[in-house]
Image (cartoon, rainbow, N blue to C red):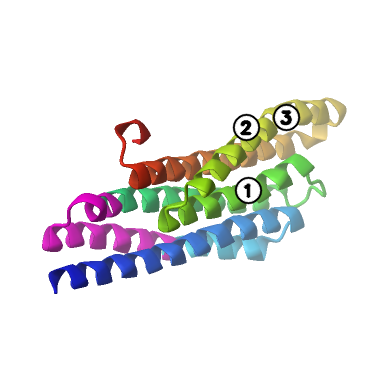
Amino acid sequence: MPRTRLMGEINRIKDDMKEMGILVCRDITDAMSSLEKKDVVLAKNVIEDDTRVNKLYSDLKERCIQTIALHQPVAKDLRFLTITIDVVYNLERIADYSDDIAEIVYFVRKYPINLEEIMEMGVVANRITENAYRSFLERDLELVDAVGRDEERMDELFGKIFPLLKDLVNEKPGKFIFAMNMIMVAKYLERIADHAFNIAHRTRYAVLGDAESI
């Protein structure tokens, strides 16, 4: 019976983490869509979603701690619960960066410019986040490898942004504010990929249990 209760709680934690992951990915998509369309209403919705994400994070962290204290799990179950706390922290940070991107919409809404590289970074950010949290929930090392490839692609795209924006400002000095804000967007997207990579790295440890994956 105690084992049954433990597994029931773990399954509920997994369900809620999936809900959190879906919400965080939606926030990335909506933040980038609001940037592309200069849609301040959609941007506001992303920012308001932060309260829900924060609540899920707090609830999941507390439930993991309580489950460890009450059920005293060992081996794989203990590893899952302790790593879950780290995974949901990274998801919460990803959501924060989506909020930051949404806030920038207010400052660039008058500039009818979109950079293809920035938009591609948004696509990669969404995909890498989804693959990261799914890799943990599904214990899927192939998804971990996919996260690694996307992290490299994000770095490539990020490396192209500053030269592009430098050229833009040289040609059109009036676009300086726009360029500075786009550098921030690129940095936020790059940080999203870093947090997704952290999740995938923890997944490898959860699955393999080797110290080198910590």
Hey, what amino acid is under mark 1? Ile
Q: Report the quarter where the N terminus lies.
A: bottom left
- Which residue shows up at 27% across the image and 54% down it? 81
The residue that label 2 is drawn on is 155
Hey, what amino acid is under mark 2? Asp
Hey, what amino acid is under mark 3? Lys
C-alpha gap between disc 2 and disc 3: 9 Å
Q: Report the quarter where the C terminus lies.
A: top left
The residue that label 1 is drawn on is 104
For residue 72: magenta? yes
Residue 65 in picture, x, y percent from top left: 20, 57
- Which residue shows up at 67% across the image and 31% down it? 156
The numbered mark, 2 or 1, whose residue comes first in the sequence reads: 1
Residue 125 in picture, x, y percent from top left: 60, 47
Residue 80 in picture, x, y percent from top left: 30, 53
Magenta segment, which residues? 52-81
The residue that label 3 is drawn on is 160
